Image (cartoon, helix red, strand yellow):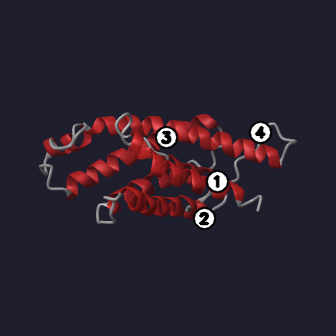
Amino acid sequence: MKRALPIILLIALLVLFRIVGPMLQGIMPGFGPLPAVFFCVAACMGLRWLWIPMLAWVLSYQLTNLIQGGYSWDWQMLIVIGGFGFAVALGYSLRNKQRALPLLGGSLGAALLFYFVTNTGSWLLLPDYAKNGAGFIQAQWTGAPHHAMETWVFLRSGLLANIFFTSLFLLGQRQWALKLEPRREFAPIRRQR
């Protein structure tokens, strides 16, 4: 049970944030933990643990739909999955880094990749954007005219969220590992493939 507790806590926190997160959308739209968690799991725990953020994402998405309504599974979810995939790839490429600074920098890169991939997917697939350079810039920076906020606001929120949640993840991982192995000054991040 001790080994499962961090996993259960992580899933519970992600589900809770998914339910509470929409309340922050007026202040910090796009501020959420999932890109950072996908990045951190790939970087710190390995690919075989990706079922944790996937399960949390699926559960939280369904719970949000039941509680708030209006969320549905559609083809646009493939764009989000693509964004998570790039965050995972970047995290996995940094799996040998055990210092916080490279991981925090990688987390910023994962936020940029998630933003770029999801906005590029929207540009390619949605009729809101002209399929030219101006439409691409619009998708990356301002968004469609009928959107309530410019898309760069989501980039800002995503960068802040990734730094915040990656820091929490690394702190929690280190603290949990220190309690399990108290003799070491810093517990190494376990890498598993």
Mark 2: amino acid:
Arg
Lower sequence index among marks 1 and 2: 1
Q: Which residue is mark 3?
A: 162
Quadrant in the picture for the C terminus? bottom right
Q: Which residue is mark 2?
A: 48
The Cα atoms of the two marked residues, 2 and 3, are separated by 22 Å
Q: Which one is in front in this view, the residue at disc 4 or the one at disc 1?
A: 1
Q: Which one is in front in this view, the residue at disc 2 or the one at disc 3?
A: 3
Q: Which residue is mark 1?
A: 9
| SS class, disc 3 | helix
The Cα atoms of the two marked residues, 1 and 3, are separated by 19 Å
Lower sequence index among marks 4 and 1: 1
Q: Please give the name of the residue rendered at 75% of the width and 59% of the height, measured from the top-left corner.
A: 3
Name above or below for residue 122 compared with residue 164. Answer: below
Mark 1: amino acid:
Leu
In this orientation, which residue lies closer to the viewer: 23 or 13?
23
Lower sequence index among marks 2 and 3: 2
Q: Please give the name of the residue rendered at 39% of the width and 53% of the height, measured from the top-left corner.
A: 83
Lower sequence index among marks 4 and 3: 3
Residue 103 in view, yes or no = no
Residue 170 placed where, x, y %? 64, 42
Q: Is residue 64 left or right of residue 43?
A: left
Q: Which one is in front in this view, the residue at disc 1 or the one at disc 3?
A: 1
